[in-house]
Amino acid sequence: MRVLLLSLALAFPSFSSQFASNEQWSTSLELEDFENTDWHYHRWMAPGENDLRSPCPGMNTLANHGFIPRDGRNITIPRVIRAIDAVYNNPSDPVLNLALKLALLTTDAPDSFTLDNLRLHGTIEHDAIPLSL
C-alpha cells in the first residue's frame, strides 16, 4: 500500500499532501457547476457517414458530444480552447495553443480547420492528448 501511494505521489506531486494525510476525496459533483449545461444537446452521438474525425481521441470526444461542431468542420481555436476548458477542466496553456495553431497550418482557411486536417503526417504527432492533469 505504501509503495502504491508513493508512486501516486511521485506521479501527481500536487496531490502528495492528500496521499499522506488519508483525506477522503469528494466524488460528488456540485450541481451548480452543471446547471447551465444542456445535457440533451451534449449527449453522445456516433459520427455520421460524412462527418470528419481526427487521430486524437480527445478531439473526437469533443465532436461526438457537440462541444465542437459534430461534423468536424469549421473548428476555430477559441472554440476548442473553451471546449477543453469546460469538458476537461484544463485552462489554456502554451502547449495547447501551439498545437491548435499548428492545426491551422493544415488548411487554407485563415481561422478554422477540420478534424480530418489533423491526420496530415508531421502536423501533430503525439502519444497522448496534450492535456495536463
Image: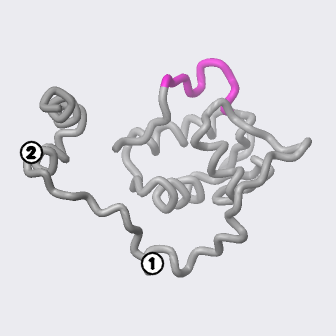
Q: Which x, y percent locates residue 129?
A: 49, 35
Q: Is residue 81 above or below residue 10?
A: below
Q: Residues within 10 Å of mark 2 (few under 14, many from 20)?
A: few
Q: Which x, y percent locates residue 93?
A: 37, 47
Q: Nearer the viewer, residue 13 or 21?
A: 21
Residue beneath the point at 70% across and 44% down:
113
User: Farthest residue toward the top?
Assistant: 121
Residue beneath the point at 66% across and 30% down:
55
Left or right of 4: which side holds 77?
right
Q: Quadrant of the N terminus?
A: top left
Left or right of 105: which side holds 11?
left
Q: Is residue 35 above or below residue 124?
A: below
- Marker count (numbered): 2
Q: Is residue 131 above or below residue 119?
A: below
Dot 1 amino acid type: Leu
Q: Quadrant of the C terminus?
A: top left
Magenta region: 118-127
**SS class of the residue under badge 1?**
helix
| Residue located beneath label 2 in the image | 20
User: Farthest residue toward the right?
Assistant: 49
**SS class of the residue under badge 2?**
helix
Our reading of the magenta stretch's main secondary structure is loop
Instruction: Tell me which numbered mark, 1 or 2, is placed earlier along the sequence.
Output: 2
Gap between marks 1 and 2, in whole Å?
29 Å
| Residue located beneath label 1 in the image | 31
User: Farthest residue toward the front?
Assistant: 1
Answer whether residue 125 is magenta in the image: yes
Residue beneath the point at 75% across and 47% down:
72
Q: Nearer the viewer, residue 80 or 111?
A: 80
Question: Which quadrant would residue 6 be assigned to in this image?
Answer: top left
Answer whether residue 89 is magenta in the image: no
